[in-house]
Every structure is written in C-alpha cells, then in structure tokens.
Amino acid sequence: MNEQLQSDFDKFVKTSKFSREEIQFKKNYLNNFIKKGFPNRKQEDWKFLDISQIIKKNISNLSYFNDYSQSNKIDPSIFVDGLEHNKIIFINGRIEKIDFNFEEQNKIEIIDETKKNISFDYENSLIDLNSAFTDKVFKILIKKNYSLKKPLIIYHSTDDKIKSTNINLRLDFELGENSCLKIIDYFANNTAKNFINIFYNFNLEKDSILKNYKIDKFINNNLKYSFNNIEQGNNSVSETFILSAGSDYFKNEINCNLNGEYSSAFINGIFSLKENQQHEIRTTINHLVENTKSYQLIKSVLGKNSKSAYQGRIFVNSKAQKTDGYQLSKAILLDETSEFNAKPELEIYADDVKCSHGSASGSLDENSIFYLMSRGLNYQQSKELLINGFLMDVVEKITDVEIKNLITNIIGLKQ
Amino acid sequence: MDTREKDIEKLKDYKYGFTTDIENIKAPKGLNENVIKFISNIKKEPKWMLDFRLKAYERLKLLKEPNWQKPKYPKIDYQDLYYYSAPKSMKDKPKSLDELDPKLLETYKKLGIPLQEQARLNGIAVDAVFDSVSVATTFKGELTKHGIIFCSMSEAIQKHPDLVKKYLGTVIPVTDHFFATLNSAVFTDGSFVYIPEGVKCPMELSTYFRINASETGQFERTLIIADKGSYVSYLEGCTAPMRDENQLHAANVELIALDDAEIKYSTVQNWYPGDENGKGGIYNFVTKRGLCKGNNSKISWTQVETGSAITWKYPSCILKGDNSIGEFYSIAITNNHQKADTGTKMIHLGKNTKSKIISKGISAGYSDMTYRGLVDINSKAKNSSNYTQCDSLLMGNKCGAHTVPYIKNKNFDSNIAHEATTSKISEEQLHYCQQRGLNPEEAVGLIVNGFCKEVLQQLPMEFAVEAQKLVGISLEGSVG
C-alpha cells in the first residue's frame, strides 16, 4: 500500500500546480499517514466498524490518484428542485462551481487556504490522508451581521470516469459575529465504488448560527467518511442533522468544542439501513466553559444484514459548571440479522452539571402493531406507520421549516 | 508467675516454635518456572495442578499488561515481587489494640465493630482467635450435615481433586487476560465452595468464618459451584478497613451455576486506599466471572467498593443457559486520590436470558470514577432483555465521574435499555437536612445512603447495616 501511496502522490503532485512549499507541506501529511495507516478496530474509536477491513473487503485496489487538472461536466439533473439555493458543486472531488447568486457578494469572501495548517488536536490518520491529497482548500467567510438569504447546498457527485478511487475534499467555514449559514450536504446517487473522505472545519464567532444537514439518501456503493470540526464562540448555536441511509459505508464524525459561554450544539441523526449497509455516527462534544448546552438524538431502523453504531461522548471540563448535556439513542431491529451497537460515554469533571444519556434497542412493539391492526390497517401498513412516527420524531427537531419539509419529502415520511 | 500465666507462656512458646519453621519458607523474588514449581511443591499439589500453572505461565509470557483503563499507575516490576511467603508469625503482629493506628481504631468505633472482632481482624488476642475458630467449627458441622463443601482452595485440591479439576479454569481460562493468567500461574490460596444438588445453604457463607483465612492472599483464587437446584449466598471481605502489605492484588473468582441454581455473591471491599495525598494504597485488579451454565440459573453480584487506591474490576455474567438471569448491583465510592474503573459484563448467549445492572458511583475529593460496562446480546439469545441504570454523584469540582457503556444488540427479539445520569447533591437538599438538626456530614451521609438504597437493599441484613455506615465514613472530609 505504501509504495502505491507514494507513487500516486507523485503523480498527483505532477498533475497539479502546487508551489514547492505546498508540496513539502503535503508530503509531511503523507508521511504521517504512511506511518499510521488506515484506522482499525484496535483503536477505540473504530471498534465497532473497522474501516481498514471494510476498505479491503470492498475495494480491491484503491487508487489515491485523482486527476484534478481537467474539469468535469455538471449534470443539472442532480440539482434539488423546489428550493432556491446557493451551490457548491464537487464532481469527482474537484470544485467545479461556487455560486452565491442569491447573496450580497461583498458579504461573503472566498479565500484559498491550501497551505493552512489544521489547528486542532487529532489522532485521526484519515485527516492526514485528506490533507495530503486535497486539491484546493477554500475558506468561506461570512461577514459580521450577515444571514444568508438562501441555504447553501453542497453537491457531492461522481461520474463513471473514476472508480475505486480515494477522493479527498475539504472546506473551511468562518461565520462572523451574528451571522447565519445553512448548509445542506447532498450526496447524489453514484454506483461506482469510491472511498470519499470529507473534512469540514467550522469556526463560529459570537452569536452566529450554523445549521448543517447531511443527506445521504440514495442507494450507492460508495464508502464515505465525513469529519466535522466545529469551534463555537459565545452564544453561538450549531445544529447538525444527519440522514444516513444511502452508502454502503458511511461514518459521520463530529467534534464540537464549546469554547464560548452560552453556546449550544444540537446533533440529530437517522440511520435507515437496508441490505449489508454499515453506518456509524460518532460525536464528541467538549463542554469547556460554563453554561453550555448540548443535545443529541439518534434513531436507527435496521433492516437485513445491516449494522449501525453510535458512539457519543460528552466531555465536561472542570471549569464547565452548569453544563446541560443530553444524549439519546434508539434503535429498531427489523431482522434477525441486523445489529445495533452503542457506546454513549460521559466524562465529567465538574459537579454542578446535568448530564444524562439513554439508549434503547429492540424490535417493533407487538402491542402497538396489534392496536393498529385492530383499527383496520394491515401488518405492513402498521409497521410503516410506527416507523414513520419513530423517525418523524427526529425530523421534527429540524428548526428550519423549509428544509424540514424538503427532508421529510426526501425520506418519504408523512406528517 | 502463677500457673495460669505459665500456661500462657508455654502456649506462646509453642506458637512461636511452630511458626518459625514456616517463616523460613519463602520463595525467591521474581517470577519464573522454578518459583511456580516451588509454590506447587510446597502446597503438595498433584501434577495436573502444576501443569495448569505452567500452562498459564507459558501463556503469560506472550501477554502484555493491558493499558486501556482510565486510572493509570506506575509500572509494576513483576520480577521484584515475592510470589510466595508463609503467613506472618505472631511475633510480627501487634500484641494489643493499643499498638494499632489510632485512626484505624476510630473507624472501627464508628462502624460499631466489637472489640473481639477488631482484635481478630488484626490477628491479636489469642482468645479471640480461639473463640472464632470454635465458632467456625460449629458452622462447619452444620455445613457438613448438608454435604456442603466449604474449605480453602489448597484443601480442596487435596481432598476434592475431581471437582476442582472439572471446574477450575472453565470460566476464567488460563488463556485469559494478563492479570487473570498471572493469577492462574501463581495463586496461593482462596476459598472453595460446593453446594450439592437441591441444597439450600442454611447460612451466609463468609470468608470471615473460614479457618486459615486471616491472611488475604495477594493472588487469591475462589471457586464456587452450585449444583442443580441449589442456592448459596457468599460474602467476601468485611466492612472493617484492611491493612495489607501487598500492593498488587490480582484475585480470580469463578462462579458456576448449574440448572435451577442460584449464587449470590456480595463483596464489601475496604482496603487501604492510600493517604490523603494519594500515596500508597492497594491496587485491586480482580477478575470475577460467573457462568450461568444451566437453564433457569441465576447469578447475582453485589459490591460495595470503598477502599483501594485503584479498583479495576468487572464482575461479569455469562448467561449460557436458557432463561438464566444475571444481576449486578454496585456502589463504588472514591475519595481523596482514589481511582476506580469498575462495572460489569453481561453476555447473553441463551434464550430468554435477562440481566439487570444498577450501578451507583460517588466521587469526592480528587478522585476519579469510571463505570465501564458491556451488554452483549448474541444473535441466538432470542427474547432476552437487559436493563441498565448507572448514576453518578459528584462532590466538588476536582473529581471526575465517567460512564462508558458498550451496548451490542445482535438479536431483534431482544431489548436493551440503558440510562445514566450525573448530578450533585443540591444545596436545597443539604439545607433541608441541616435545618432539621443534622450536621453537614450527617446530611451528606443520609442523602448518599438514599442514593445507594437500591444496592444496599441487596446486601444480607447484617452486612447492610455496616455497609450503610461505611458509605458515610468513606466520604468523611469531602464536605465543605
């Protein structure tokens, strides 16, 4: 693997127009990754789903080389209808378009940050891999007191030109004081097997609001890993919603540092898995100062041979008195071959806190099905109705009405 | 000197003469094959026992000390330990209660432990020892009547080799983790209990009443077998603080419940936790595992952990038989610089198996407490259920409380429910109690006892009263 990494890296450097300095910078990350390799189950964070095994099993010869020198054609059929929005379009990992047509242009700045070091502690080799192979890194800066009029949809799409390839992409966002940004990550349906490694870095200044919705709905064979690092200032709010349903493998990881007082983080997630899918959500919420709040709700509906895992960690620093942390994960197992794993973790060093977590898993309640059937529904309908209600609970948590309706429609839930 | 005194002198002489012989027997420092052979030889063990130990030792050479736990400790040099030394002679022991640490005596007083018992715990008064020996013998008679075997492990290896051979190492195999394997190689003694078919053990069995149990070994090995339809309740340890020279304790406890049998195992551990600054103290790295081998069997663990500098243990249940039940009730209290990483594992293999986990953690001072647990429902364990509740109470902002549950559900007929909360004693509660005339420490004691009630209820009567006091005492100095 290492030789291939090295030769793919050389090829990648040759086809791109990096400065010598940039190449050296990327080389360091490559060496880090070569040293560590893909994470495996020996690492606590990868205990339930071992990515090195999953990649080995699914992609026989993973190529790290991706030609960013040629542009790709944008297929407009992937665009979301019925909602006016700004666009960032990634095709095969290359940024094809950044389009903020609905906004005041002087309120948004786009900065090239390819050389910038990552500014937080991580032990994750996939971030090294990402930093070594990303093409361009842009920072999107929302200026003070500006709320975007329309949501931003980031399209992730691949075409038949590439397969068995590792695609790495990264975006940085900075939300100025009292600004507001809504992002929808939209994963199109592609069938070729690729390993997509996404890294977002958010910096939320005082009083800013970030809403991030990740929608992976359409069945595809990709393996995906997404990492969000969120730094929050005073009184800022972040809301993350994850719909994890389409890919063969998808791990969403969120690291949220509540650095400012009265900041809060909300994470809601749905796993809706079928045949052979393996998905995971891992969250780390670090309560670092007083009066911060976090809320997490994750629900799974698991079909045949599917496996979901939720690892949630709430960390409370000794300074972070008056913390309010809450975590709930629930799962419905529909088949005897489905599997649910959870590790809700609390690590608390302050005494005046309210922290709790809960986890429940089991099959659909027979009594409820009986009740509905006695009211004239057939077995299938009753089952669907119950699952509908179970998942609707999470969708209801979305604070933006327009996006809530969009997501309800995409999932196919009834209000 | 009158005749009576002379008699006592004689008795002492005899005692000394008797023990000096043993005193000379001490295995050389370090861990190697010869030391293991030495231990086996001195205990006159049969060949199969020695083979068992050597097999464990072979395995041990390949193993590495685990380091995933939360409380870290300085590296232990395993070649710098004595793996066998004969019990201390009367000469080294304190002659009267006056020689003891006054702090220790104060605690005894608070716990309400009678003088005779205090002396026995420290191995002082000859009378007291004799007294309890005779008590123990009476108990023995009663047990033999029912066909119950309750003796030391060494005795069991000599007298009941078939039972030991059949069951030893079946729950904790020699190929288990580092500390368990270390124990398999070098264990010195422990308790052995066998309850025959259909017998309900008429009394609570306790290490306290077992002859030869005055020294808790560093590497204890306990094996309890409950045959079909039998019942036994076993108590380990006692509420009185135990001073011990050995820093590392790596005991193994194996429980086996056959069809329709029930084992209740209660532990109160109050070993030396080190001083206020976290210096010294015992490392309690114990492996406890129960196997519900037969259908409809039940194993219940109850533990009150207040002592030791580091407690690192997970009493577990393997629910192999259909309809078997596993329970775990725990109170863990850490104060000053104590650290605990404790919890349980419930492994559901049989159909209709049920487990329940109630864990209460209290941390005060600079201490750190972790609940770590695993609930694993296998794909064949149809219609199983688990309920877990783990609550933590924090006193002060220098301590930590952590919860790390692992939940694995591979069966769609089964339910797992897990709840955890972390909180502190509210000012209102304290104020209310103080207003009614309690001093702050009493108030905290009262509130904490309420918090722990669900677990304390599971303890046998005599024990529960002492344990309740112990809970209060362990938290002394943590208020205000």
Image (cartoon, grey):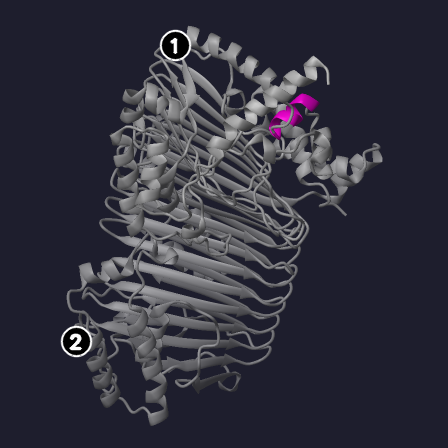
Residue at the spot 28% in from the left edge and 74% down from the top edge: A34
Residue A177 image offset from top left, x and y in percent? 60, 76
Q: Nearer the viewer, residue B370 or A128?
A: B370
Q: Which residues are magenta?
A: B114-122
Residue at numbered disc 2 = A161
Q: Is residue B465 above or below residue B277?
A: above
Looking at numbered disc 1 in the image, what kind of residue is underneath it?
Gly
Q: Which quadrant: the N terminus of chain B?
A: top right
Residue A24 image offset from top left, x and y in percent? 34, 88
The 10 Å Cα crowd at callout 1, few under 14, some 14 to 19, many 20 or more, is some
Secondary structure under the numbered disc 1 in the rendered image:
loop
Q: Is residue B234 above or below residue B278?
A: above
Secondary structure under the numbered disc 2 in the rendered image:
loop
Q: Nearer the viewer, residue A214 or B56?
A: B56
Task: Provide the major secondary structure of the magenta segment.
Answer: helix
Distance of label 1 from label 2 (alpha carbons): 79 Å
Q: Chain of mark 1?
A: B
Residue at the spot 47% in from the left edge and 26% down from the top edge: B265
The 10 Å Cα crowd at callout 2, few under 14, some 14 to 19, many 20 or more, is few
Give the residue furthest to the top.
B145
Q: Chain of mark 2?
A: A
Residue at numbered disc 1 = B147
Looking at numbered disc 2 in the image, what kind of residue is underneath it?
Lys
Give the residue furthest to the left.
A60
Location of residue B271 by image quarter: top right
